[in-house]
Amino acid sequence: MNGKDALGQDIDARIAAWLSAVARVTPDGFTPVARFDDVPDQARADSYYWCDSIFRSEVNPHNEALGARHALHAATDDTPDLLRHELAAGGLELTVTEGRNFVLVQVERSCLDILSLCGPDRAAAARRVAEAIFNTGIASNTVGVPSPSDAVVCPVPDEAPDLEEGTTVSSNPAVDPDLLACWKDRTECGVRGGRLYFLCYKKSSQRAGFANACQWF
C-alpha cells in the first residue's frame, strides 16, 4: 500500500467514525435548548462562527427568522459532544449536526428522496442542494488549491460514482483534511439511511489538526 492509499483509508475511517458516532445518538439522547445562549460558551461561539462561514444566510441555523430547533448531546463513552439544529428553509428540510471538528448536513427524505432518482439525476440534485445551502463568499488559503468563487461542487460532475446507499464521495480527494486552510476546499457527500448528506470539516488556516471531540462542552 502506498502513502496515498493509506491516507485515503485514514480519511475514510475518520468519516465513518464521525457518521457512526452521530448515528449512535438516539433522538431522545439530545436535550432541547430553548435559548441558544444556554449552550456552553466555547461550543456556542464555535457554532456561530462555523455556521456563519459555511451556510448561506437564508439557511443558517442561527438565522432567527427560520426558527430552527436546537438541541445538545453531552459526550458519553462512545459518543462526542454534539449540537443539533433542525430547520426548514428554501424548500429543504435539514438536520444539521455539529461536532467539535465537523458539520454534518442531512437532507430529509420528505423534501428530497435522493434514491428515488436515477443515477445522473442524483448527482445533479446533490449539486443543486449544495448550491442552495453553502456560502459562496469564502476564499481559500489552502496551498495548492485554487480559490473558487462559486459554490461547493460535490459530487464533482463527470468524476464521482453514482450516489448509492453507503456511498461517500469527496469534492477534492487529493487534499488532506488535516492540511485544510478553508472548509470549502474539501467536503464530503453521500447517502446514509436513504438521506443525502454533506460533511464539512471545521478547518481554517489558524487551526492545525483536529481537537478532542469529547471536550467541547
Image (cartoon, rainbow, N blue to C red):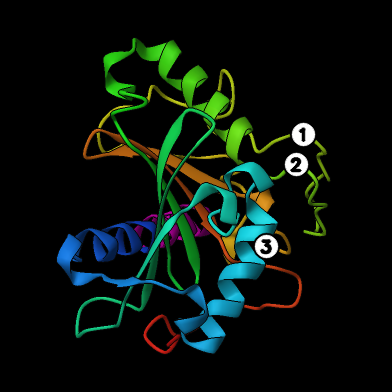
Q: Amino acid at mark 2?
A: Thr
Q: Is residue 152 magenta?
A: no
Distance from disc 1 to disc 3, alpha carbons, whole Å, reads 18 Å
For the point 50% across and 71% down, the residue is 101
Of the numbered discs in the image, which one, if any, rests on residue 180?
Answer: 3
Q: Quadrant of the N terminus?
A: bottom left
Q: Number of callouts in the render?
A: 3
Relative to 133, say whether 105 is above or below.
Answer: below
Q: Nearer the viewer, residue 49 or 152?
A: 49
Circle 1: residue type = Asp
Residue drawn at 64 percent across, 42 percent down = 58
Which is nearer the N-term, disc 1 or disc 3? Answer: 1
Q: Are marks 2 and 1 in contact (CB under 8 Å)?
A: yes
Helix, strand or loop for disc 2: loop
Mark nearer the viewer, 2 or 3: 2
**Residue at 49% of width from left, 45% of height from top?**
188
Instruction: State which quadrant residue 34 falls in.
Output: bottom left
Secondary structure mostly seen in magenta is helix
x, y percent for residue 84: 38, 62
Where residue 53 appears, as percent x and y from the top left, is 69, 58
Where does the C terminus fall, quadrant-wise? bottom left
Q: Which mark is residue 150?
A: 1
Look at the image and say whether residue 8 sits in the magenta stretch: yes
Circle 1 — which element?
A: loop
Range of residues picked out in magenta: 1-13
Q: Is residue 149 left or right of residue 18?
A: right
Q: Examine the rendered structure and indicate whether residue 107 appears above or below residue 212.
A: above
Mark found first going from the N terminus, 2 or 1: 2
Which percent across, then down, holds residue 155? 53, 30
Secondary structure category for the residue under label 3: loop
